Amino acid sequence: MVNRLAQESSPYLLQHAENPVEWYPWGEEAFACARAGEKPLLLSVGYSACHWCHVMEHESFSNPAIAELMNENFVCIKVDREERPDVDAVYMAATQAMSGSGGWPMTVFLSPDGRPFFAGTYFPPRDAYGRPGFPTLLRRIATAWEQDREQLLQRAESLTEVLQQGHTASNGGGKVAPSARLVPDDAVTSAVAHWRASFDAVWGGFGGAPKFPSPGAIRTLLRHHHDGGDAHSLEMALATLRGMAQGGIRDHLAGGFARYSVDAQWLVPHFEKMLYDNAQLARCYIEAFQVTGDPTFREVARETLDWMLARMALPQGGFASALDADSEGVEGKYYVWSDAEIRALLAPDEARAFCAFYGVTPQGNWEGQSVLQTPLPLEEVVQTLGLERAEMEELLATSRGKLLAARRQREPPGRDDKLLTAWNGLAVTALAEGYRVFQDDQYLKDAMKAATFLQNNMVADSGRLLRSWRNGRPGPTAFLDDYACLAEGMLTLYEASGMAWHLEWALVLGEELLVLFGAEDGGLWASGSDQEQLYFRHRESLDGATPAPSGVAAQILVRLGWHFARDDLRQAAARIIAAEAKHLRSYPWGCTSLLEAAQMLQQPPVELVLVGDGPTPEFDAALAAHFLPRRMLARHNFKAGDQPPFPALVGKPLVDGQAALYVCRDFACREPVVDPKEVDAVLPQHP
């Protein structure tokens, strides 16, 4: 027996299609049923890789007695937060306001018109952990709806008013003076001071357990060091990247990073792997390699990109969303090892070397098993074992191959194979940067394959961008993060490949997002004017697991303004930043995307134009050696056709038939460089 979710395409919704709960997908049918029956709605929101979502599904939603309570008293709606980030965001705001915290699965009770009156997250199947069991909660809510309905509706109305007021556009916007300071002069300094206060000097990262990757903080710290030579900013960024690379949050056999660490040491991960984490972290490691030249950062960056291509790439192009934390119903089972298992699979000398380097012990480091980590430097382990480094590296490589082959025989975690436009934009950006810095053609090939698929399949006949796609079925229309992240991907891909249509599409997306998401005060709404209007319209100014859409959009508009010499786009970016000024003043550490956009406006870019009559690998390698976070790179290969009429390319021909690099700043250009060995001398020098 299946419910209505069997007709959906989302893997998360399909996981609930055989529940005895009479689930509805989000839509008018559910609300009409609630109105007709004068029933409250029970909204459950989660995502496919969420461990506790699986737990609640097994404990409660698959339980016939609990399902009967749900069906009798409520109209039940199941939502995939990744497909409908708008629904997730507005009801998460209510959950946090009512309970003081949030998370998934999210459980919200609504009036028939969609206003929330009670919310929480995971509820156990019986009273435990100091909270009511789910059946107890269902009975209480049902009784209150019958006996104190007016009080519940009044509560819903009051909460709605508070949340609506908090997201109201603040002013009329208007033109921002070019000389205006968009953020306080000490905003970056304040953010750095905040991170310094919470920095873990032993393990890297910020705060205690659970510990999350902080790509926005890492990239801001690298830029702060770049701008002023602050050594401590660099050390905080590098120590965090090293800590994650050494810890169990990194998959030491196949690559890729888990969502977060449940401890402060980066040892035991929450084992789900998300496309967005790995795309962002790959960029962090690429930039750290550019800053330091340390081959360890190059190795981790490439390993992460290679994992994306091996495990997340979809056959038709683009990338899947996530890998589950569980396999065979057990969290982390696919990834952990026992000492005995390893010694049975490896030769004695291999096992000795592998266990010493990857921290494997008979007692294990997590529930009697070992999460692989590298707690000691290779040189120290080599010395302890009395081996030569080359011998040790050969033993480790052989061992990893054997264990990876054995791991592939296990039941793998489920993969959420829906394609999300925003996350694919992040992936394309990471691959394009990987190609630009490492000159690996495979990265460019897969980034371009994804871009082509996105353009061919993620644009409706009306021209409107779409949010998701799976097995030939498109999902809802796109949100601000989809437009912003995809535009960033296309612009970055153009700067890596020189293909004009990537830049042209980035411009279309940038112009469209201003029309669809623009607010009266110059800021941006997260959902479009043509999309479903929920009980309030929300803004996304703060970074979360993914960068703030408003910040990414502002950065893209600045960069497009550079490429197309359009002050109107730079002004639009300035208005976005001005509209979010209160956040930048109050907690700049939570607005790294907006903060970087403001700095891009206030610091003129290094303008680079590279033209050639074919590939230019020597020039590309010379440029890749420099960390230039605020640069404009225009390029054209004359063998591919006529030079497009982009303003940055006008008047930039080949020099005597040779490739040339034009370096400009503050509206003045140097003599073109025709010898790649001279690139270092003409680029700005930084710490």
Image (cartoon, helix red, strand yellow):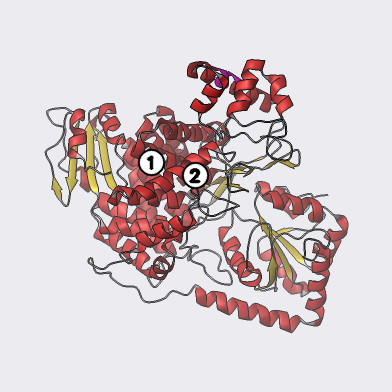
- Report the residue at 70% width, 74% height from top: 111
The quarter of the picture where residue 178 lies is bottom left
Q: Do the residues under discs 2 and 1 have CB atoms within 8 angstroms?
A: no
Which range is magenta? Answer: 395-399
Whether residue 75 is situated above or below residue 558 in the rendered picture? below
Q: Position of residue 350 (x, y in %)?
A: 62, 18
Q: Residues within 10 Å of mark 1 (few under 14, many from 20)?
A: many
Asked if residue 398 lies in the magenta stretch, the reply is yes
Q: Nearer the viewer, mark 2 or mark 1?
A: 1
Is residue 56 left or right of 79 when viewed as pictured?
right
Q: Which residue is mark 1?
A: 287
Q: Position of residue 158 (x, y in %)?
A: 62, 81
Q: Position of residue 645 (x, y in %)?
A: 22, 44
Q: Which residue is mark 2?
A: 424
Does dot 2 land on a helix, a strand or a loop?
Answer: helix
Whether residue 496 is situated above or below residue 136 in the rendered picture? above
Amino acid type, residue under disc 2 in the picture: Asn
Q: Main secondary structure of the magenta part?
A: helix
- Report the residue at 78% width, 82% height from top: 148
